[in-house]
Structures are given as C-alpha cells and as structure tokens.
Amino acid sequence: MTGDPQPISAAARSALEQELADLRDERRLVAGTLRDRTDVGDQADQAEQLQRATQLERLDRRIEAITDRLRQADVAGPAPTDVVGVGSTVTVRFPDGSVETVQIGEIAEAMDQTLVTSGSPLGRALLGHRPGDSVSFDTPDGPSSAVVVAIGEQGQDG
C-alpha cells in the first residue's frame, strides 16, 4: 500500500459496514457479561474475566480498523473507472475465452469470491491498465495472461 487513502467498491463497503455492525453487537454482549460480574470468585472466574477482557480488546481493535478503513475510503472517493486501481471492478478475458468480473481489493475476504487482492499476481498485473490492455502474470501452473475488457461497477453484460 502507498499510504494514500484507497477507494473500495460498494460491495466491499457494504460488507465492512455489516461486519462493523456485527462486531459492535458482539462487543455489547461481551461487555455486558463483564459488567454483570461485580464479585470476582475463584481462579476459574478470574480466568474467564480475563478471557472476556482479551476478547473485548480484539473486538475493539477490529472495530477501529474497519472504522479507519471506511473513513479513508470516504476521503479517497469512488473507485476509478478509467484505469484499474484498488476498488475497481474489472472484467477480464482469459486465453481460454472465459470472462470474469473481479474486484480489486486490499485484503482477501472469505465472503467475496470475486475479490482479487492488489498484491496478488493478477491484481498487481491489472493495476494501472485500461480496457483493451493485455496483462501477464504468474500462476501456480505457470505464466498466464488476460485482457482488460471493461472497468466499472458491473463491467459489460453479455
């Protein structure tokens, strides 16, 4: 990453906003269990309290990271549509004739099967290119290539 704020796609923003809401709900539940315990009993009770406190710290770190990422995306504005960048939705055609629409993101998320990270071989190859450009990249099976068909929210239908 360059340190500059990077845009994110609408789908990635929505997923982050949902994760943030879920994390805040989970945090409220965990914090509530800590508040309910005014008396500290034996070592097992103390260990349980420590585990909850550690869980709260983990939740707080993730909430802060998501909040910061969404704030940075707001500063960066929308994903580019003239050249491939982080946050772009890109339709590419592979040598076998298959066409796929992928989103260029920063980190892999299990929830989004169309996400290609900007640090992956395909993601790095696509960055900075325009429709009509051919790119080459390495795969576990050897060198490959693709042609940028379109850049935009959904690419081209058909």
Image: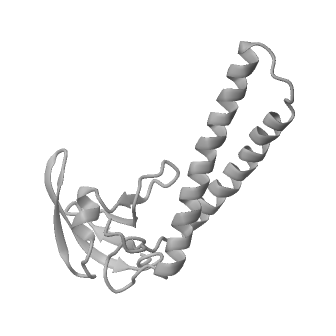
Q: Quadrant of residue 103?
A: bottom left
Location of residue 156 in the rendering, given as x and y in whole percent from the top left corner = 41, 79
Q: Residue at x 83, y 37 (%)?
A: 35
Q: Nearer the viewer, residue 98 or 32?
A: 32
Q: Residue at x 63, y 54 (%)?
A: 19
* Residue 97 seen by the camera: no
Left or right for 136, reference 77: left
Q: Nearer the viewer, residue 42 or 132?
A: 42
Q: Residue furthest bottom?
A: 82
Q: Quadrant of residue 145?
A: bottom left
Rendered-image quadrant of the N terminus:
bottom left
Left or right for 91, reference 15: left
Q: Residue at x 26, y 70 (%)?
A: 126
Left or right for 56, reference 156: right
Work out whether 61 lies above or below 11: above
Rendered-image quadrant of the C terminus:
bottom left
Location of residue 98 in the rendering, given as x and y in whole percent from the top left corner = 30, 62
Location of residue 63 in the rendering, given as x and y in whole percent from the top left corner = 61, 54
Q: Coloured how? A: one colour
